[in-house]
Image (cartoon, rainbow, N blue to C red):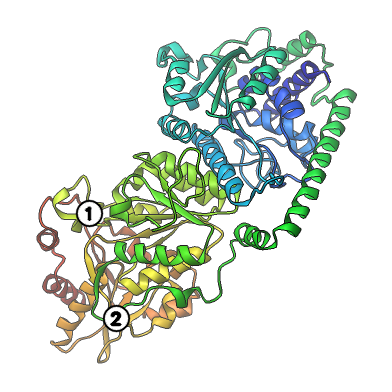
Amino acid sequence: MDLKHMANIIRGLSADGVEKAGSGHPGMPLGCAEISSVLYFDALRHSPLNPKWPNRDRFVLSAGHASMLLYSLLHLTGYDLTLDDLKNFRQLNAKTAGHPEYGHAEGIETTTGPLGQGLANAVGMAIAERMLAERFNRPGYPIVDYYTYVLCGDGCMMEGITSEASSFAGHLKLDKLIVIYDSNRITIEGSTELAFTELVKDRYLAYGWHVQEIDGHDIDQIKEAIATAKQENERPSLIIARTNIGQGAPNKAGTAKIHGAPLGKDEILAMKKALGLPDTEFYVSDEADQMRTQVVNRGSMLEQEWNQLFNEWREKYPELAKEWDRAFNLDLPQDLAAKMPKFQLGDKIATRAVSGKTINALAKEVPYLIGGSADLAPSNNTHMEGYGNIKAGDFSGRNFNFGIREHAMGAIMNGISLTGGFRIFGGTFLVFSDYLRPAIRLAALMKQPVIYVFTHDSIYVGEDGPTHQPVEQTESLRLIPNLWVFRPADAEETVHAWLAALKRLDGPSALVLTRQALPVMPKHDSTNMDKGGYVLYAEQSKLDLTIVAAGSEVSLAVDTAKLLEQEGHGVRVVSVPCREEFFAQDPAYRHQVIPPDKPVLAVEVGVGSGWYSICPGTQIRVFSLEQFGRSGKANEVGAYFGFTPDNLAQEAKKLLK
């Protein structure tokens, strides 16, 4: 097995792919060719004919700009990625997108590109491996037993999310996580000396990691380092591989010029000549074809051995096998709604408290539901009573203490969701959703059904003041494609929001919840609550005006409607707990709920620009908060900004005139 030859084949393919596309990043593919050759042809336990084999080793290319490296590897090891796919690199609708996109090509474990996200996803995958092993492995039946490998670069090391995730991985002692750091000391602007001079080895030792330093072009050293990392059973491993960016390119190697631009035809020809490769574009040798066959055969054999073990396990532990199937299919009990908390009209309870009661009811019925908070469980009400906490050496619990690491929490949740077998939720204050927004965006992009619990949703946070009073966050979350944002108006809507989020499997959901108590309201048409918007309070006379709102503003809208009724106006109140779900309905239903021939007043204690789209063509006025809040008692702050029935009635009269 000539891994050096395979490394050179990888160099040729990667350089040709970037050159044909006219854009891309050849530096890391050339510099990490030996590392990736050892990984894919020697170290990884994977089955190219079945990329979703549950017990495969995971490989995450955290430095996603080096995507031609991954595509070359997938082609050379027998995945469903052809030479034509490589030639189509970075073209519209190609499997080989500019950065690895989850779901585009088999063998891509996660979407990477924003630096550090992939490494943090991998921490989630390594956590999931430990949790699945704890739940399903039995003596003699290690059906869950895989490693998670990461290849990252200097850029990943500089990102803050990497620090958060690596700290958490060290805390949990994730010994089956192996990170290879391509330390080539070059970024777009030039040498890392410009901005990055820390001692990475010392930093990771402080995190509690096992650290090795090697020559990243020495195949024997790479093999030995991986073998040593696999023997480590107390700590995650970091392998610092010193490499030369663009290794093999005779004139551009070691310079920033090769990081993110094609080599040029002359440089490629010179490189191929120096490496002993023919001039042929996208050249794959006979030896490489033979290696592909070997990798495929070995992977199939590993999978067959596992299948035999798995089938024996299923026969010996049939109830456990049913649990496995339920977890990986995310099956929900048919009568789940009947087992949720019930509330009486007039009860006043914060929706964050209702969410907490609902989470604990769900925990009893959905054993694969897991979650936690960024050090705010008592405030977010996210703790599942009696189900233990995840900690180093004991992954049997269901509660996470993510610490004050919102960004890493979001990316770790994505990694767990991508692994399968769990439904994960994570909580923090709504105002801090900004800290995990990049991970939310990637969850939406990858269609991962993670759930966010965002509490303390408005200026009614009160005395903590404008730094903790979210104003723009709810509307900004609604802007993320494929993220459904639920802002329930009372306890019943909160329970429904949780059930709707659990039923949703093609994207993430965010629950935006109150700190203050809200009354449980009578509902004119609760049967349509699952349509994202419905008539909560019906007009008592001929309709003159519709008030549309979500969350705490719905009860305020009802009080406003009752004031206007005293003056003879017919006013309807429409609750829209999930605008995305409402917009997904048939236009006829939406017009039935919000008649387009009557004026509309939309109310939101926050930025309200999105409400203008609630019923196009309608005369609409949005009463919202387009500035930061104030520190003071919650009700006084609300009144200061005009969120009272009397003031809203005056706003409504302007429309009625």
Nearest to the observer: residue 270 or residue 70: 70
Point 65% across, 23% down: residue: 226
Split into 4 quadrants, where in the image is the N terminus?
Answer: top right
Q: Is residue 640 above or below residue 30?
A: below
Residue type, numbered disc 2: Gln
Q: Is residue 141 left or right of residue 542?
A: right
Q: In the drawing, what numbered circle is on residue 626?
A: 1
Nearest to the observer: residue 166 or residue 641: 166
Classify mark 1: helix, strand or loop.
loop
Which quadrant of the figure has residue 306? top right
Which quadrant of the figure has residue 557? bottom left
- Measure the C-alpha gap from mark 2 to mark 1: 35 Å
Point 70% across, 19% down: residue: 223
Q: Is residue 268 left or right of residue 333?
A: right
Q: Is residue 176 left or right of residue 390?
A: right
Nearer mark to the viewer, of 2 and 1: 2
Reading the image, the residue beneath label 2 is 344
Residue type, numbered disc 1: Glu
